[in-house]
Amino acid sequence: QQQVKQSPQSLIVQKGGISIINCAYENTAFDYFPWYQQFPGKGPALLIAIRPDVSEKKEGRFTISFNKSAKQFSLHIMDSQPGDSATYFCAASGDTDKLIFGTGTRLQVFP
Amino acid sequence: GAGVSQSPSNKVTEKGKDVELRCDPISGHTALYWYRQSLGQGLEFLIYFQGNSAPDKSGLPSDRFSAERTGGSVSTLTIQRTQQEDSAVYLCASSLVREGEQFFGPGTRLTVL
């Protein structure tokens, strides 16, 4: 019940395309859903986050879509760029503050 | 000042040895977290410190793992009698307040031979 399932494991997108990464959770107590971006040799950095009172949040080219009834949320990267090539992790937390992370998606954007 | 720092950046040790990993959180951050990232895996929660409260140790995988946080700032993660399965990147994060954004350090890559 504590798991966050993430897919796909890897994703290859052409420059200018849309990258979509999906996550699903079981624990209905989760109320905070962040996405982290990690470059090789670096720690993860917060990209964008959402709480379940809204169904969508957009920041620049990055959008989180949230479906509370389906217990799913996704990250959309519009106009994907080679600089977006990184590993992306979804996560969730609830009444405790520890983040439960998905297994990550390695995104490669080719020019 | 600067972000979260961790030392050493890399640690190679022999099976059975003890290791200490250090984390310097962002000044003023009250919450500090340790995670473990194994190859091809997500980040696994280990332990959480919040202010003067008792730490949440629920993620520690065995009694060989322990952590302390001195003076509400620097934290040390200790792994005793290391095993090969302990090989991973150990990440530290801090946040200003509870439920705040977690800022991660660059991690310590531990290799147990």
Image (cartoon, rainbow, N blue to C red):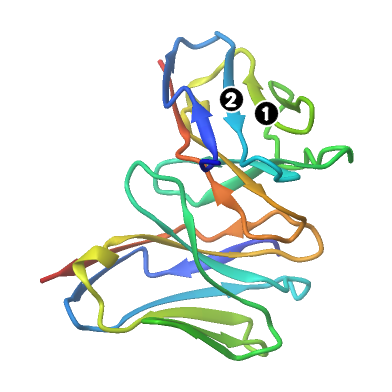
Q: Secondary structure at mark 2?
A: strand
Q: Secondary structure at mark 1?
A: loop
Camera-nearest residue between A14 and A83: A83
Say which quarter of the image contains residue A63. bottom left
Q: Give x and y (percent) for residue A16.
A: 19, 82
Q: Give x and y (percent) for residue A27.
A: 73, 70
Report the quarter where the C terminus of chain B lies: top left
Instruction: Find disc 2 in the rendering and name its residue.
Output: B22
B2 relative to A83 in the view: left or right? right
The residue located at (64%, 46%) in the rendering is: B94
| Residue type, label 2 | Arg
B46 relative to B43 in the view: left or right? right
Q: Is residue B20 above or below residue A29?
A: above
| Residue type, label 1 | Val
Q: Are marks 1 and 2 in contact (CB under 8 Å)?
A: yes
The residue located at (16%, 77%) in the rendering is: A14
Instruction: Find disc 1 in the rendering and name its residue.
Output: B74
Q: Give x and y (percent) for residue A23.
A: 51, 73
Q: Chain of mark 1?
A: B
Reading the chain from its start, which is encountered first: label 1 or label 2? 2
Q: Is residue B50 above or below residue A87?
A: above
A106 relative to B63 in the view: left or right? left
Residue with the most extreme left position: A111
To the question of a shared chain for discs 1 and 2, the answer is: yes
